[in-house]
Amino acid sequence: MTTGARAMQVLPQAGHPRNPGMTLDLDWVAAVQANTSAIERRAATLPGRRSVKKDHQAAWLCKAISLIDLTTLSGDDTTGRVQRLCAKARAPVRADLLDRLGMTGLTVGAVCVYHEMVGPAVRALEGSGIPVAAVSTGFPAGLSPFHLRIAEIGESVAAGAQEIDIVISRRHVLTGNWQALYDEMAEMRAACGAAHVKAILATGELGTLRNVARASLVCMMAGADFIKTSTGKEGVNATLPVSLTMIRAIRDYEARTGFRVGYKPAGGISKAKDALVYLSLMRDELGLPWCQPDLFRFGASSLLGDIERQLEHHVSGNYSAGNRHPMG
Ligand SMILES: O=C[C@H](O)COP(=O)(O)O
């Protein structure tokens, strides 16, 4: 069986056709604006609007777990750490807690690693149905020679990665070179083959929300399956104003083309209450289809531990120490 065929079988079944992309429409790109003060005002109201409580809250927290790309992206990653992370991905919540919640079969959405760790992660997750996502294309800066960035995608797919998180060249956005961004993204998408591609915009380095909106649109036009905020390594990572901007770009793209693109906020999302805010934002702006793993992921290394802690509080009334919920 080829890697591509295996990827098609294992990926969560999408209830929608994959975004094929379209010809670059520079008039549409130029027409895109972002009203920063209105977006910031709306974003500021979101944390206060969270209303799910008790059993509903526990159910939404379990939903959030199923949407996590459980991530380790450290220079000191080892096979052992990745194996422990994969064990956590298979069984993200202690069995006694799950029993008391009446939940079975809960896993995270994917495990996200550097290329060198793709093989160990694929082996550790065998039979689980959990895909491995590889960060690629000279992550996090994306400044290695272009042919090497393309080759890196091919190697990660050959090693068994079913999802590829690429980084865009920020300079193409900062100089308004939309053709270059489109061409780069289209070539990366082609290199991914059957593996799904998440385009990391590194929004903390794009200067303005208008640039974020335009870069989102160009990446979707070039065939991105997901758009993702950040590598987790920028000074500013996922924020609510950036999320509103990207989510509305996804909504406009679907309205104009009929194709659904997924969203992945990443970097600095570490609290259960933040996860609930993101989910209510997705539900309000895009609807329930965007609360499923084929259209939404959290890129997070430590969110799961806090969610597990909150679930323990839900069933026992007590908070345990964070170190009782180790990740790797
Ligand atoms: O893509 C995922 C991010 O690198 C994770 O960031 P985090 O460690 O701040 O959760």
Image: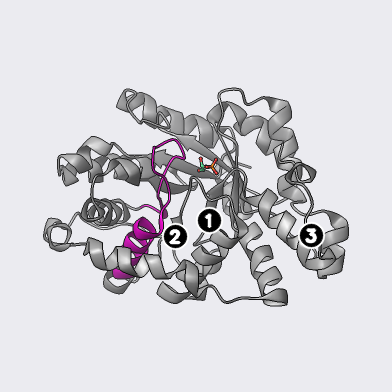
Q: Residue tagged by mark 1?
A: 297
Distance in Å between CA atoms under marks 2 and 3: 30 Å
Residue at x-position 70% and y-position 30%: 81
The type of residue carrying mark 1 is: Arg
Residue at x-position 13% and y-position 55%: 26
Magenta residues, as a range? 224-252
Secondary structure state at the residue bearing disc 2: strand
Q: Quadrant of the N terminus?
A: top right
Residue depth check, mark 3 versus mark 1: number of the one nearer the observer: 3
* Chain-order first, disc 2 or disc 3: 2
Residue at x-position 74% and y-position 28%: 80
Percent of width and height locating residue 241: 35, 59
Between 292 and 259, which is closer to the camera in this rendering?
A: 292
Q: Residue tagged by mark 2?
A: 262
Between 175 and 115, which is closer to the camera in this rendering?
A: 175
Distance in Å between CA atoms under marks 3 and 1: 23 Å
Query: Is the C-beta separation of discs 2 and 1 under 8 Å?
Result: yes
Task: Look at the image and tell me whether residue 1 can be seen.
Answer: yes
The type of residue carrying mark 3 is: Glu
Query: Is the C-beta separation of discs 2 and 3 under 8 Å?
Result: no
